[in-house]
Structure formats: C-alpha cells, structure tokens
Amino acid sequence: MEEIKKTYYSISEVCTKTSLEPHVLRYWESEFPSLRPKKNRAGNRAYRDKDIDLILYIKKLLYEDQFTIPGAKKKIADIRADEAPALLQQSSPALPEQNAQAPVVPSDAMRQETISQLKSLLEIITAP
C-alpha cells in the first residue's frame, strides 16, 4: 500500500515513521533548537517532512554514530539544519537512495593552499 504524502504529520505518525517514542521526540525538541515543529490551533505538534528528516538525522547521530546529545547538537550547529538530511543518503532506510557520492578527501596540497589563503585573509583582517 502506497503512503499518502501529507503536508503535516501528528506526533503519533512521526513516531511510527521513525520508530521512536513520543517522549523521545518531545525531549529532542527541548535539546535541539533546530527541531521546533509548528503547533496547530489545538496546540498539537504538526511535523513537516523536513522535521522528520532532521529527526532521522538526529537518530542516526545518536544511535548509529554514538554521538552524545551535546556532540550531536554541535554537529548539527556546524552544518545548517536543512543540509542535515542530505547526509542521510546512504545510512537511512527510510529515505530513498539518491546519487550517493564518495566523500572528498582533500590532498595535502589542497590543505596547504587553504591554510595559505586563510593566513592571507587573517593578515588583511588584522592589518591596521
């Protein structure tokens, strides 16, 4: 049976999609500033697809990658929250497989060039 695409999902629907308990979602909302679902007129949480993607990313960080909550918060703060779901491409069975690319590993020359450019910028910024 094909799943119906909706704009908003209730907390119970999100729990079913993510295999998480409601208390876990509510706790994560208090810990992760980027996870703030809208509330409807009755005060019930209304999750969007991007919220669900972020929840799946947080779940991956905590359960698969063994991050602590502060570590996961830092990781998410280091990247924009709307980019986080793209990192799930290979790791989450809930998301469709997309064009997964191998991570780019910078060479020593690339690192040295980056360091050189950063030093030049620092000199410009700190010049009187």
Image: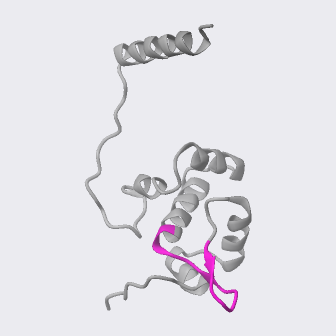
Identity of the residue drawn at 69% across and 71% down? 24
Image coordinates of residue 97 in percent, x first then y, are 30, 62
Q: Nearer the viewer, residue 44 or 31?
A: 44
Determine if residue 104 is in view.
Answer: yes
Q: Quadrant of the C terminus?
A: top right
In the shown orientation, is residue 110 left or right of residue 63? left
Q: How is the image coloured?
A: one colour
Whether 43 is among the magenta residues is yes
> Above or below — where is 120 with respect to 87?
above
The number of numbered badges drawn on the structure is 0
Image coordinates of residue 64 in percent, x first then y, are 54, 55
> Above or below — where is 104 with respect to 7?
above
Q: Nearer the viewer, residue 29 or 121?
A: 121
Identity of the residue drawn at 56% across and 50% down? 65
Identity of the residue drawn at 41% across and 70% down? 94
Image coordinates of residue 74 in percent, x first then y, are 64, 45
Q: Nearer the viewer, residue 97 or 114?
A: 114
Identity of the residue drawn at 32% across and 92% down? 1
Residue farthest to the left? 99
Determine if residue 67 is in view.
Answer: no
- Asked where in the image residue 4 lies, by quadrant, the reply is bottom left
In the image, the segment drawn in magenta is 37-50
- Asked where in the image residue 27 lies, by quadrant, the reply is bottom right
Image coordinates of residue 41 in percent, x first then y, are 66, 90
In the shown orientation, is residue 5 left or right of residue 37? left
Whether 112 is among the magenta residues is no
